[in-house]
Image (cartoon, helix red, strand yellow):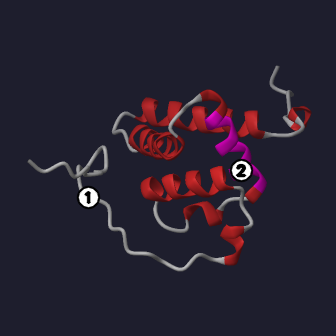
Amino acid sequence: MNNVLKFTHPDTKEEPDFVEEPIHQEELKRPLPIQLLAQDVESHMGKGFSDTLPREIFESFCLRTIERNEPTGLMLAVLVSNFMKAYADPDPEIAEKAMEAFDYLTYLALDDKSVIDDSDQ
């Protein structure tokens, strides 16, 4: 009987490639939980994805997913995928609603929400 544990990707069921890659000095400066979540994000979004984001925002996002016990990389992948699917929908109304959702997220992310022009009210 084979008692070896096999780790597979939850979606593809493929076994991960355990080739060791050099660790960059910048990565060593991150706290361990952030390093682990960066690896999770990169497994869903591609290598180097976390490096394209502002460090403070990425770390805050990772810590919030820990607090809320939510899947860090998967949540980002689903967010991007769902937006792309809705935006590319053949129905122009659905594409417009996707842009409204995008604009609303942009609004929520603003530090100073008073900069929004309320002249249409």
Q: Position of residue 113 (x, y in %)?
A: 86, 33
Report the Cα–Cα distance between label 2 and label 1. Answer: 28 Å
Name above or below for residue 38 compared with residue 68: below
Q: Secondary structure at mark 2?
A: helix
Question: Which badge, 2 or 1, is on the more N-terminal residue?
Answer: 1
Task: Using a 10 Å C-alpha cutoff, classify the residue at mark 2 as few (fewer than 14 neighbours), some (14 to 19) or many (20 or more).
Answer: many
Which residue does the image show at 74% across and 66% down from the upper left? 29
Q: Is residue 47 left or right of residue 112?
A: left
Q: Is residue 30 left or right of residue 39?
A: right
Q: Is residue 2 left or right of residue 75?
A: left
Q: Are marks 2 and 1 in contact (CB under 8 Å)?
A: no
**Magenta segment: does it hold 63?**
yes
In the rendered image, the quadrant that contains the C terminus is: top right
Q: Is residue 116 left or right of residue 101?
A: right
Q: Position of residue 70 (x, y in %)?
A: 54, 32
Name above or below for residue 46 compared with residue 101: below
Q: Secondary structure at mark 1?
A: loop
**Magenta segment: does it hold 60?**
yes
Magenta span of residues: 56-66
Instruction: Report the residue marked by disc 2.
Output: 59
Q: Which mark is residue 15?
A: 1
The quadrant in which residue 116 appears is top right
Which residue does the image show at 46% across and 43% down from the upper left? 74
